[in-house]
Every structure is written in structure tokens, then in C-alpha cells.
Image: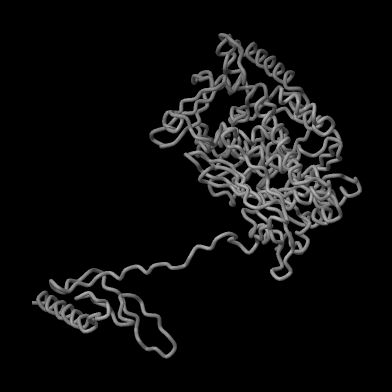
Amino acid sequence: MDQKKGESKQNIDINSMLGRMKEGIKQDSSAGKKGKKVYPEGRRFRYRKKRNGDTTEKRKPPRRMISMGKTSKIEKPKPRKNNTKKKKGIESYVYERASDDQGIYLPKVDWSQAIKPKLGGQAKEGEKDLKKVDEYYSLVPKNPKPGEDIFAYSHITWNEKKNSLIYEVHEPSLSKKDKELLKEIKESIEERLDVDFDDLAQIRARSYISEKMDEVLSILGRDLNPMRKKAINYYLERNFIDMGKIEPFMKDPQIEEISCDGVGIPIFVYHRNSRYGSMETNVVFEDKDELDQYVMRLGQTVGKTVSMASPLVNASMPDGSRLQATLGTDIARRGSNFTIRKFTENPLTPVDMIEFGTVDPRTLAYLWMAIEHQNSVLVSGGTATGKTTMLNVVSLFIKPEMKIVTIEDTAELRLPHDHWVPEVAREAIGEEGSNVVDMFSLLKESLRQRPDYIVVGEVRGAEAFVLFQEMSTGHPGLATIHAENPERLINRLTTRPIDLPPSLLNTLDIVIFLRKVRRGGALLRKIDQVVEIKRFSRDKNVPLMNRVLKWDPSSDRLVNENPSIVLNEISEIKGLTEDEIKKDIEDREKIIRWMVHEDIRDLEDIGMILSRFYTDKESLLEKIRG
């Protein structure tokens, strides 16, 4: 009985709702189509906005379509056409293009003759499918000789369960007895240890370990076959002298970053091959105490004490790598963790940047000319977009005889110039903090050194004010900063903690914006745009930028968008015509292409080529033509 009442009530509600909807539908006589239904104003199935004094309740749309018979049917309202036209040209208040009479266009590029990047270009057949990756290479030793024993090697392959690439480290396998013997020998050596390995050269330290192992084996009366002895000796050297479990990663020049996220979590590595990117490994810290002790050991490596009271470490390792570590206290929920950002043994050069597809020879030739004529350059981008690498590359174009002062918080820049003063900030040594030498102090002192160029690793605080003041006094500056686009760059520079006066930004000449893009499964670093500071707008209270080059994703090229004001100023200063300026850029481009063709990557060789360009340009070009 109750069920019938409920059904009758439901039918009444539906019928009454249908009646109300029929009353609201009118014939549209102006449409010219018989039977077309329109809704009166305010009767569409949507929420009605409540205006001042309007007591009408919001009407909810029905959850489903309801049939009204054979001839009548409620239709969904058609989406409105968006008649707003796309704005052409400049899309931001920051940009203001230079007119043709204000600047000079860069020479056109013959893309048919352009250098194809080795990484980031079109993948060859068979390279597109990551599931087919099966790569091996030796780690210890790095370059084994014929017949030489290999103690550690890497294997990069596809894992079906993880549905991703896996980086596996293979080291000598030890039996249970061998592991017990290794532990016993290690404890015995620690008891007899009477020397600090930091005071010994690597070769002498390894000989010392081998001698101590022989002594312990003799005392224990154990006689091992050569292979077992070599394996145990490898682990002793790895744990005493080297970096323990992560030593194979440290030996791999292709690894850019090592990341341990906590106890029982596989270590992740970031490969320099953009097709591989971030990969899980088979190396894990299973025990909490083991990981805690390892983080403390990392702290000792960089001369820092890690404890419950001071659980954070941020420092530069002896090989120049960056270390950030956290001891597993209440602030690390998954246990101790660390991240090591490795740097290449040899710094990346213009040749590397071109082959990676980050930049093309014409753009480098333009930047070369701009830096030679003492223009200030800022390299901007997000995290891990290659800002410091790009800064190092463009700094190579500074004339060899110029005095350069570089200021960093972590030593990363490497230049071939003889007249180079590298300085690194340091934290307090004493408890009072009186011995702090920060980047702000170093920048202030650099003015007394009378540098021709000042290069700052990264500006993130008060040191930016000193740098821009120095640029305004005629000292060209080069630096990096975290900002993804012009709007964010201006916001970053004009707000705390940097807080520069907007008018001071007019001392900057060129900004290079970098970005990370994913193409064909590979994560690549690209120059997104190159802009010049045109003028300062008092109305908008911002510097206006002229975008010279813009990356076109469809063609994967840097397109010359607007004429260059910097080139126009150079032509006026040197008294050169537009054709002569373009010819000069083309000559520099030929030299860069020649370095790529000859695979010239050594810093000293690059320095000699640039020096010869300044002293005997014609003979260098003649050699290239020959």
C-alpha cells in the first residue's frame, strides 16, 4: 500500500512538471521552421543568478531527458559560439616589439644545412620504443682494458611490472659466508685503523686497505681464492674509501642526479640521456640505522655535523657535486633522505648544447657578439632547466684578456680564461656567525677588484641589488635566476626578498628563458625565448621587452621574431652597416659549426679558437674554409 502511494505521488510530480514545461514552451514564428521550440528568458535549464531584490529561487536542471511525446522533445541547449577573436602579436603587457628602424634582424638560417641534434631530434626507427632498450656499460673500472676484471656495471632495461625503465647495478655476488667474512675483516680493520684516509692519496689508500686485509686474513688463518679475495677487497675499498652503496652511481658520468627518498625505497637516478630521464634502481637502504649512519657520513664528507639538533645539510662535495641531506628526525616522515646533483667531469660546451638541441649556432653567434660588446645577460628558467650550464657556455665568449670575477654559493662554473677570479660564498665557521662570507659581501668587494665582467651563479636575495648597481656603473654582468617567463621574472626581481626598483631593471640588456619540454618520450631543455630590454615604461612601471627569438614547437626551431636593438646599438658604436653586422654574425656561426663538425669540446681548445678569432680572424676563417 505504501509503495503504491509513493508511485502515485511520483507520477503526480512528473505530470505537474511536464505541464509547467509545456506552458513555458512557445512557437518561434520568426525562425521560419515549424515546430521549433524556444525557451522564454530565464527558463533555460541552468542556475539563475540572484540579483538585488530578486526572491526567485535557483532552479536546478533535471538529471535526465524527459520525453514529451512524439512531436515534442526537450533538447539540450546548444553551446554558445565564442565570437572572441584571438589577439594577434604581443600577448603580454611586458612586450613591446622593436620597429624595423630600431633594430636589425638576425641573418636567416639555411635549415637544410642545420646541424641535427644527437639527442632530442627525430628518433631513429627502433629508438622510439623504450621497451626495446637493453644497454650495458662498465662502471668500475670506467674504461676496462681487454681482460681486465669488471667489478660493477650498469644495465638499463624495460621492466614490465613497473612499466618503466629500470637502472640495475651489478656487483660481485657474495655468499653468506663471504658476507660474514667481509663483516669480520671490516671490524678488524676498524680496530687497527691508525690513519685518516682523507690524508692519503687514493692509490696509497687502496694499497693500505689491501695490506690490512692480508694481515687480518693471516691472523684469522683464512686462505681465499683470487676471485673471492678480489670481490671482498672491492667491497672494502667501496665502503672505506669510496661512497659505499652509491659509489657505482658516482662513477657513472651519465648520471645527473641521485635521490634517496627514505628507508626501504629504491634509489632513483636521473640519466643525462633525455630518452631515459628518471629511473628507479635496484639499490635500497633497507635498514633505518644504516641510512641514518650513511647520512651522517655524507655530512662528515662535506665537513658538517649532522645530528638531531641540526638535521639538515646543504653543501658542496669534494668533487663539486651538490649535496642536500636530511637526517631521519620528526621532520623526515619516511626516514633519512639525500639528493646529490652531480656535475660533468668536463663542463658542457657550445658543441654539447647544439647537439642536445637546446640552442642553434645562429643564436650562439648572436649571444657571442652581444657579450663581446659588454652587454649584460640574465639566464632565467625553472628548476633543472640548465641555467648554470647555459651561463657557463655564454661566459666562454668573453674575450680571453678580460678580467672575470665569478661569485657562487656552490662552485660550478669553469672557464678557460687566465684572468679569472673564482670566488665561493661560505657559511659561518664559528658559533657567533662572525665568519660568514655571503654572496652579498663578495659582490661588494668585487668592485674593488676592477673586473671587466661579473658572473654570479644565481641571484636570489640582496646580492641582486649590488649586481644591478654594478651593471648600471658600466660593469657588464651575467647571472641566473629562477623565473619561467618575463612576467614572473619582473615579479621576482621587484618583490621581496630581492625587491629591486623597477627602473633599475633597465640596466639589463638580454634575458635568455629556458624551459623543459617533453618530445617523443624525451625530456629536453630548450631556449624558449630570447628577449632584449627595450625601454622602461613609467606608465606601467615595468621594463618593456623586445622578443628577438622564440622557440617554435611545431618546427623545433628558434624563429627570429623581431629585429634586435642590441645589434643596432653595436652597429652604431662600431660604425658598421646592417650587412656588415650580419656578415660578422655569419662568420661566428661558421666557426661554431666548424667546432661541432670537428667535435671540439675541450675548454682549452675552445679558448684558443676564440683567442685566435680576436687576433687573426681571417686566417681562422681561411682554415675553416679549407
- In percent of the image, x 11 and y 74: which residue is there? 3
Task: Name the image colouring.
Answer: one colour
Residue 305: in sight, yes or no?
Answer: no
Where does residue 160 sit, x and y in percent of width and height? Answer: 39, 33
Query: Does residue 175 sit above or below 128 in this rendering?
Result: above
Looking at this view, is 135 or 560 the one in front? 560
Q: Which of 38/580 is in front?
A: 580
**Coordinates of residue 356 in the picture (x, y in percent):** 59, 35
The mark total stands at: 0
What is the quadrant of residue 182 in the picture?
A: top right
Decide if residue 324 is on the left or right side of residue 538.
left
Q: Residue at x 9, y 76 (%)?
A: 4
Q: Residue at x 65, y 60 (%)?
A: 95
Q: Quadrant of the N terminus?
A: bottom left
The image shows residue 439 at horizontal and vertical percentages of: 79, 49
Quadrant in which the C terminus is drawn: top right
- Nearest the viewer among 31 and 123 is 31
Q: Nearer the viewer, residue 333 or 214?
A: 333
Across and down, in percent, residue 274 comes to 54, 36
Q: Quadrant of residue 500?
A: bottom right
* Vertical order, 113 against 184 (above or below): below
